[in-house]
Amino acid sequence: MAQRRKVNNLLGLHVMATLSIMPLHPYEIAAQMRARGKEQDLKIQWGSLYTVVQNLEKHGFIEAAETVREGRRPERTVYRITDAGRAEMTDWMRELVGHPQPEFPRLQTALSVIGVLPPDEAVDLLEQRRAILEVENEAQRASLRGAAHEVPRIFLIESEFQLAQRESEVAFVAALIKEIQDGSLGGIELWRHYHETGETPDFTDFTAPP
C-alpha cells in the first residue's frame, strides 16, 4: 500500500536522486534533468521545481550547503541531500519498484467509453494510433541502438520499459482492430445497431461468459 508522503510529487524524488550525486542549485538540477530527458519519464511542470525544492527543505530532506554568486547574477542557494532525504528516497524507491499501484492511462479511459464512437470510426482512429506508435517505436529502437554504444544499459532501462509498453499497446490495438473488423468482438452487433438506429442497447438478456 502506498504511503502518504510529506512530499508526494514524484519530481521531489528526482530532485533527491539528482542531489544524491552532488550538491546543486535548482537551476542546475533542472538543467541536468533536461539533459537526461527526464521529462520523458514523468510529467514535469518546471515552474513547480522551486516549490518542490522548498518543500523538501521544509521537511528536512535537503538542506542549503552554500550560497554562491556568479558575476552580477543574484545569489543562488546550493542544496545537498540530508541523511533523512536519503532514507526517504530509498524507501520511496522500494515502494515504487516493489509494490504495483493502479495506474489509469488515457487510452484505458477512452476504451472504457469507446462505444460512443461508431465502430468504423473507432477502427480508423485505432489504426491512426497504431501507425503513430509504430513510427515512434522504430525511432526509439534506433535511438537505443545508437546509445547502447555510448551509454551503459543501466541508464537506458527506463527507455526500454517505455518501448516495451508501447510495443504491447501496438499488439493490443492491432488485435482489437481485427476483432472489430471481423465481427468477433463480443457485443459488436449491439454496438453497430446503436449507431445505425440510435436505439439504446438492451443488455438485460446478455450473459457474460464465465
Image (cartoon, grey):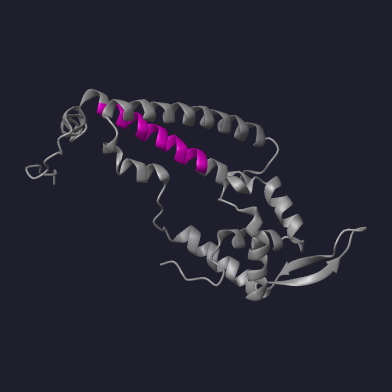
What's the magenta bit mostly, secondary-structure-wise? helix
Let me know if residue 146 appears in the view: yes
State the residue at coordinates (65%, 75%). Answer: 58
Taking the spot 43% from the left edge, 61% from the top edge, the residue there is: 99
The magenta segment is 162-180
The answer to which quarter of the image holds residue 65 is bottom right
**Whole-percent x, y for residue 178 in the image:** 29, 26
Q: Give the residue furthest to the top.
A: 182
Q: Looking at the image, which residue is at 66% across and 59% down? A: 49
Where residue 126 appears, as percent x and y from the top left, is 37, 30
170 within the magenta span: yes
- Residue 185, compared with residue 49, is above or below; it is above
Residue 90: x percent and y percent? Answer: 58, 66
Q: Residue furthest left?
A: 205
* Front residue of 51 and 17: 51
Q: Is residue 190 left or right of residue 5?
A: left
Name which quarter of the figure residue 141 lies in.
top right
Where residue 206 appears, x then y in whole percent?
Answer: 10, 42
- Name the foreground residue: 148 vs 61: 61
With 46 as the anchor, is 169 left or right in this view?
Answer: left
Look at the image and tell me in which quarter the N terminus lies: bottom left
Q: Is residue 60 visible?
A: no
View extreme (front): residue: 198
Residue found at the very far right of the displayed protein: 71
